[in-house]
Image (tube, rainbow, N blue to C red):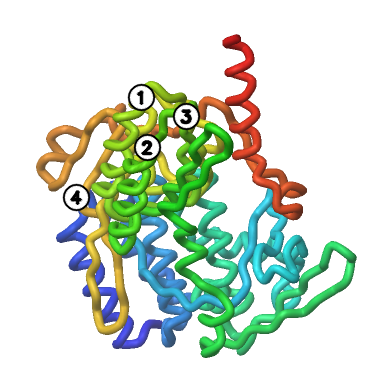
């Protein structure tokens, strides 16, 4: 059953979802939605934030299918630990002293089962997005305490095996600890060090890991500083797009306008499984400028629903997609009529980005702090120059 409080929030979400989304029942019908709802409330007591998170995420996953990863309930309470996934092996990324340790179980539940349960509530349209959502979910209290095997627990006990073979247990309570934010910067995890750059010889490496609105001044300042530099000695520009989960696509313009003034230089673009939303707009612009793409497939089909519209009920924040885009062909539909009038089977068939050169970081390089993809790009550039001689 579901409490009156959460029933009212669900009703408000559905009302606004139908109003905002340009094709709300693109994946399932309203009758199918109602059936899923009835089955869930008969199986699950939705009486706290954790069960409500599971309930909503389960439903939204089925509304979204693979073409909408922007519609979601945004509830995050991070624990001061995070992970990297390598072929379903979960490796500690943070804290540094445990980096490389393998996560074996949570509260005695094998990590394979934990991931299988997470799969029921995580929305993704690509393998990369699945990896992103699993990695984020593993240190989000709302995700972990909502899972069937863990929702009756008062704490999470993570069993880790270090590189030396030692077994370490890390425990985290249900409520956020005031030290969590001091121990771990979620912003840094999400956005990296965007708008930073460095020179390696005659190669400029520019980090474009986020276009969140709050970084506009930082991006503008970085590009202004580059404009003032004498770049006549620069042969190659590498744009590191890895980790760019989006934000304001208009902020890509600072970088793209700068690059248009340097079209005489070789342009490389590094991609990874986290590039999403406005990040793919930057990718499309870089490809149009002739960039060679090196790295992994990205976190979204090129064509998908997007443009997050945020709605707030009580303290619960939902994002609902209000548009459909394919930036690589310049298509966008921003209202229900436009989308209904223009959509075709070919238009909505998922288009998956493939980099020119596929390479991903190996587990061994990750543990040793080696940047597999950047190192490859530098060698690739060097070999291209030699072959020109």
Q: Residues within 10 Å of mark 2 (few under 14, many from 20)?
A: many
Q: How crowded is mark 1: few (under 14 residues within 10 Å), some or many (20 or more)?
A: few
Give residue 263's mark: 1
The residue pinned by badge 4 equals: 22
Q: Do the residues labelled 1 and 4 touch (CB within 8 Å)?
A: no
Q: Which residue occupies the foreground of this view, 376 or 180?
A: 376
In primary-sequence order, the first of circles 3 and 2 is 3
Q: Residue at x 35, y 40 (%)?
A: 282
Quick check: 90 left or right of 283? right
Q: How crowded is mark 4: few (under 14 residues within 10 Å), some or many (20 or more)?
A: many
Inter-mark Cα distance, 1 to 4: 38 Å
In primary-sequence order, the first of circles 1 and 3 is 3
Image quadrant holding the N terminus, namely bottom left
Which element is circle 1 on? loop
> Residue 79 sits in which quadrant?
bottom right
**In this view, 199 is above or below 317:** above
Where residue 182 appears, x then y in whole percent?
54, 82
Inter-mark Cα distance, 3 to 2: 35 Å
Quick check: 188 left or right of 25? right
Frontmost of labels 3 and 4 is: 3
Which element is circle 2 on? loop
Inter-mark Cα distance, 1 to 3: 14 Å
**In this view, 86 is above or below 121:** above
Query: Can residue 337 be spotted in the picture?
Result: yes
> Residue 379 sits in which quadrant?
top right
Where residue 225 appears, x then y in whole percent?
35, 48
Give residue 233's mark: 3
């Amino acid at each position: 059953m579901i409490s009156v409080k959460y029933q009212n929030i669900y009703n408000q979400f559905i009302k606004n979802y139908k109003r905002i989304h340009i094709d709300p029942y693109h994946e399932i019908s309203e009758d199918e939605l109602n059936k899923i709802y009835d089955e869930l409330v008969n199986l699950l007591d939705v009486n706290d934030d954790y069960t409500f998170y599971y309930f909503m995420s389960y439903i939204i996953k089925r509304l979204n299918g693979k073409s909408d990863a922007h519609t979601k309930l945004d509830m995050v309470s991070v624990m001061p630990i995070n992970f990297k996934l390598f072929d379903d092996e979960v490796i500690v990324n943070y804290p540094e002293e445990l980096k490389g340790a393998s996560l074996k179980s949570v509260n005695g539940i094998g990590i394979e089962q934990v991931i299988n349960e997470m799969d029921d509530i995580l929305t993704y349209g690509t393998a990369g997005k699945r990896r992103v959502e699993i990695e984020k979910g593993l240190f989000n209290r709302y995700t972990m305490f909502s899972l069937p095997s863990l929702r009756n627990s008062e704490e999470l006990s993570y069993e880790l095996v270090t590189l030396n073979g030692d077994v370490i247990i890390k425990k985290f309570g249900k409520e956020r600890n005031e030290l969590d934010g001091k121990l771990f910067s979620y912003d840094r995890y999400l956005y990296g060090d965007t708008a930073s750059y460095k020179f390696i010889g005659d190669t400029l490496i520019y980090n474009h890991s986020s276009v969140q609105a709050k970084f506009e001044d930082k991006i503008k300042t970085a590009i202004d500083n580059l404009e003032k530099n004498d770049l006549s000695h620069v042969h190659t520009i590498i744009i590191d797009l890895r980790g760019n989960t989006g934000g304001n696509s208009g902020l890509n313009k600072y970088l793209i306008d700068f690059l248009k003034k340097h079209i005489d230089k070789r342009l490389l673009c590094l991609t990874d499984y986290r590039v999403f939303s406005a990040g793919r707009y930057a990718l499309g612009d870089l490809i149009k400028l002739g960039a060679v793409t090196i790295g992994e497939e990205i976190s979204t089909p090129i064509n998908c629903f997007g443009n997050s519209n945020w709605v707030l009920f009580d303290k619960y924040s939902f994002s609902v997609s209000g548009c459909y885009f394919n930036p690589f062909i310049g298509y966008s539909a921003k209202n229900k009529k436009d989308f209904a009038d223009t959509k075709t089977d070919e238009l909505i068939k998922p288009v998956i980005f493939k980099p020119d050169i596929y390479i991903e970081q190996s587990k061994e390089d990750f543990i040793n702090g080696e940047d597999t993809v950047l190192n490859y790009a530098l060698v690739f550039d060097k070999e291209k120059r030699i072959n020109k001689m």
